[in-house]
């Protein structure tokens, strides 16, 4: 090497520094690639994405290849720099050359290319895949030997190559991925994805229609009253019971009744022949599981029962879908039944309204870990029988009981505490 002219040595040193930058930058780029986007591009047939995905399937070999090239380039660069330093400055030059080369490699061979690759991983990693793929095939015997030795050392510490398999993300990790997606996912789609993940947090009790609000056909009533119930119903399916919901006969689809009515064959006897056996749901069933159960059972409506088999409420497929896509009405005043917005910013709410529906439709943050309805929430806070005019503060909300019935909250007025404080401050002024 001493016989090589100085200009050629500088040229060789420049090439080795470029190789070091390539290996360093491509390593960062390949390891920081978005795996989901890479998989999508590979499925679309992009060759560089396929090669990169294949290389990343065995990260131990890929890292071995990159480090082999990087170490070789840096070692040769150090030797060339030493020769150049000796030629230019003798012993002193040979002593200064490694220090100068370290600074150059740090800036141009490590920091700059790795920063570029971290900011634009696809622009660096995908072209590099064309280089690494054939290089890995050529050097495969060497890489296998190196990996055998390195994996043997790792196994002494309880680590094996199988640990490189991708681990599935937990629900909370998926929620963080979606929440941090930002502009990559439209806000509406982002809310829907988060709602799907939240289905496992809620149970059928959170969204069911309480038993005292279930509307259905009571076959113990006169036929004229039954016909009024059928013609005035806003639902496509109605429960059929005898006297009370505890004596449930099943569910009837009004479309079938219309067909009989058109033929003048609709009567109590023919109605009962169209009743389908009821479908019962154990209380505490998560919404994501119930969605699958509805699909498996080919059902759209079910009755929630407690541990004693008593009916607690009614849940429909549409109720669960609304948890994902939101309410089908856009006016906040009509999003929830028995909820009325006043001009002063307060909300008059029926005690049977669920806390979850209030939070979802009005953007509130009432606690959902305990009672499911507003009545239960107030009763838990009061720890005594409710009385009109009684006020309680729950979270950031003031709740005033306006009416009671049978020792329960019939209606209550809710005001966010921020609004209460602002009104009080205005009164003092």
Image (cartoon, rainbow, N blue to C red):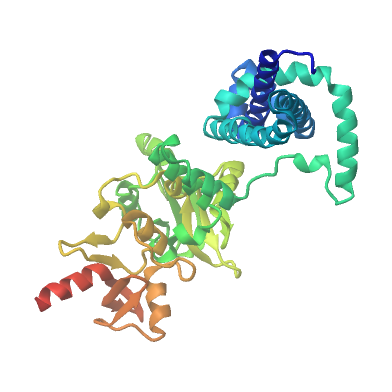
Answer with the quarter of the image where residue 145 lies: top right
Position of residue 58 in the picture relative to residue 414 (left or right): right
Residue 144 visible to the viewer = yes
Residue at the extreme left of the image, as rendered: 429
Taking the spot 90% from the left edge, 42% from the top edge, the residue there is 152
The residue lying toward the viewer, choosing from 89 and 5, is 89
Residue at the extreme bottom of the image, as rendered: 384
Q: Position of residue 220 (x, y in %)?
A: 41, 61
Relative vertical location of residue 88 with respect to residue 408 in this rendering, above or below: above
Residue 276 visible to the viewer = no
Q: Position of residue 149 (x, y in %)?
A: 90, 37
The residue lying toward the viewer, choosing from 107 and 266, is 107
Taking the spot 16% from the left edge, 71% from the top edge, the residue there is 423
Q: Position of residue 70 (x, y in %)?
A: 73, 29
Taking the spot 52% from the left edge, 52% from the top edge, the residue there is 199
Relative vertical location of residue 150 with respect to residue 56 in this rendering, above or below: below
Q: Position of residue 185 (x, y in %)?
A: 44, 36
Count of numbered circles in the view: 0
Answer with the quarter of the image where residue 385 lies: bottom left
Q: Locate the C terminus and report the quarter of the image it occupies.
A: bottom left
Q: Locate the N terminus and report the quarter of the image it occupies.
A: top right
């Amino acid at each position: 090497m001493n016989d090589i002219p100085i200009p050629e040595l500088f040229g060789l040193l420049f090439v080795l520094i470029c190789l070091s930058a390539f290996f360093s930058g491509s390593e960062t780029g390949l390891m920081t690639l978005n795996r989901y986007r890479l998989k999508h591009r590979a499925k679309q047939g992009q060759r560089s994405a396929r090669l990169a995905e294949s290389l990343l399937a065995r990260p131990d070999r890929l890292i071995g290849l990159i480090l082999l090239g990087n170490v070789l380039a840096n070692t040769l660069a150090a030797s060339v720099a030493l020769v150049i330093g000796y030629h230019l400055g003798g012993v002193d030059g040979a002593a200064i050359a490694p220090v100068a080369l370290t600074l150059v490699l740090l800036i141009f061979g490590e920091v700059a290319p790795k920063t570029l690759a971290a900011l634009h991983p696809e622009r660096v990693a995908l072209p590099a895949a064309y280089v690494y793929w054939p290089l890995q095939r050529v050097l495969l015997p060497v890489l296998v030997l190196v990996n055998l030795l390195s994996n043997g050392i790792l196994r002494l510490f309880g680590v094996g190559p199988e640990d490189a398999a991708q681990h599935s993300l937990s629900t909370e990790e998926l929620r963080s991925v979606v929440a941090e997606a930002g502009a990559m996912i439209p806000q509406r789609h982002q809310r829907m994805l988060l709602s799907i993940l939240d289905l496992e947090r809620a149970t059928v009790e959170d969204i069911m229609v309480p038993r005292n609000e279930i509307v259905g056909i009571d076959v113990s009533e006169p036929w004229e009253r039954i016909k009024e119930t059928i013609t005035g119903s806003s639902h496509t399916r109605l429960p059929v019971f005898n006297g009370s919901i505890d004596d449930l006969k099943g569910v009837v689809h009004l479309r079938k009744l219309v067909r009989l009515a058109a033929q003048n064959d609709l009567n109590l006897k023919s109605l009962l022949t169209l009743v389908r056996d009821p479908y019962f749901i154990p209380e505490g069933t998560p919404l994501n599981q119930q969605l699958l159960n509805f699909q498996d059972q080919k059902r759209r409506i079910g009755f929630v029962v407690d541990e004693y088999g008593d009916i607690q409420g009614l849940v429909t497929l549409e109720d669960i879908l609304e948890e994902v896509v939101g309410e089908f009405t856009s006016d906040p005043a009509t999003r929830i039944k028995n909820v009325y917005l006043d001009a002063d910013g307060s909300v008059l709410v029926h005690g049977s309204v669920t806390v979850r529906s209030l939070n979802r439709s009005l953007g509130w943050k009432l606690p959902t870990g305990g009672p499911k309805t507003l009545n239960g929430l107030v009763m838990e806070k009061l720890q005594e029988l409710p009385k009109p005019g009684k006020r309680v503060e729950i979270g950031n909300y003031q709740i005033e009981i306006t009416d009671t019935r049978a020792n329960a909250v019939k209606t209550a007025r809710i005001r966010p505490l921020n609004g209460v404080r602002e009104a009080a401050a205005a009164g003092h002024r």
